Image: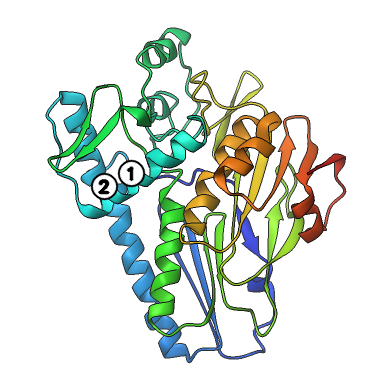
Amino acid sequence: MMNRWGWIFSLGLLCSACQAPSTHTEAYVFGTLVEIQIDDAPTAQGQRASNAVLARYQALHRQLHAWQPSELTALNQAISAGQQPFKASPLLRQVLVHAQQLSLQSNGLFNPALGRLIALWGFHQTPYQATIVAPEAVQAVMSQQPSMRALQFSPAGITSNNTAVQLDLGGYAKGFALDEGRAILQSMGIQHALINIGGNVIALGRHHGRPWRVGIQHPRQAGALAALDLPDGWAIGTSGDYQRFYLQDGKRYCHILDPNTGYPAQRSQSATVLIAPQPHAGVLSDVASKPLFIAPKHAALFAQQLGVAAWMIVDAQGHLSLNQAMQARITWLTAVRGQRVLP
């Protein structure tokens, strides 16, 4: 899995270290930077907890990788070869059932079945590079209509009636890992922490008695566009066209594909979603930004369907739209253009 989404950074992590005790751990997992900040816990306890979270992340990375050998690639091979049903582990089955539900809720704009297209556009590479894609190649995949609807689940295993389905959980796994990481920290007695996985962030407790403060990256400038407080249990995530992209003949091609066209989405620079505390808050912070990024004109509808508490979009022209809930929470750090506030 690659670093697929725009990033959010914690302003809390930039605060002084004069207030003790605090543990800050960084690692590279899921093809992106993982940061774990633990406050108000003995250093040894904080380090043990961080290590346990990172060990879990490494295991998830190995199990859910979309193109290096993993359980997910084994499932993709079985679907492609028609060798079904595939007896998946309880975890993979749980993830795919939930991903299918979210895909349906997003009217298919969140579509983890598009692995063939992601590879076609060159985003199954490390490092990726500018790729010239023939329209006929895109149409060949699109004509087969790979979607999460094609997955069926039974006691015998997972089957698909469409051999063009190739699963890529890059838009789900980071959020799933946030939820897993928060649960691990709680189980090990940690009360205050922040986990940031390449721009998807979830909060546990508070930062030295105050809510955690996070900054939202400006999609076209260095530094933060805005900042907001992230209370206990809340999660936030951004999809953007400014980290994983390439320029070809003066046109920007980002890794977020529009399932309706098969081409990189072109209508937004970034989309940020804020998720209230709930069992899958981390997952939603990862998944829900995709439909808003792809179809910004329908942001309010998809936000409602996916349980997004607050949202903000910078469109392709740099104009900003947000709902009233986000406006009430946000502090601007940079001048914005054409701000439009919706219910």
Q: Are marks 2 and 1 in contact (CB under 8 Å)?
A: yes
- Which residue type does callout 2 highlight? Arg
Q: How many marks?
A: 2
Q: Quadrant of the C terminus?
A: top right
Q: Which residue is mark 1?
A: 97
Residue at 32% x, 43% y: name it.
Answer: 96
- What is the residue that sits farthest to the top in this orientation? 136
Find residue 93 and name its label. Answer: 2
Residue at 48% x, 29% y: name it.
Answer: 108
Of residues 140 and 146, which is closer to you in this image? 146
Observer able to see residue 243: no
Residue at 57% x, 35% y: name it.
Answer: 291
Residue 280 drawn above or below residue 126: below
Residue at 64% x, 70% y: name it.
Answer: 231
Find residue 164 and name its label. Answer: none
Secondary structure of the residue carrying numbered label 1: helix
Residue 290 drawn above or below residue 225: above
Expressed as whole percent of the image width and height from the top left, the position of residue 53 reads: 38, 70
Q: Quadrant of residue 185?
A: bottom left
Residue 102 drawn above or below residue 23: above
Residue 233 drawn above or below residue 137: below
- Which residue type does callout 1 highlight? Val
Secondary structure of the residue carrying numbered label 2: helix
| C-alpha separation, residue under disc 2 versus residue under disc 1 | 6 Å
Expressed as whole percent of the image width and height from the top left, the position of residue 178 reads: 46, 61
Of residues 28 and 305, which is closer to you in this image? 305
Expressed as whole percent of the image width and height from the top left, the position of residue 11 reads: 69, 68
Q: Quadrant of the N terminus?
A: top left
Observer able to see residue 165: yes
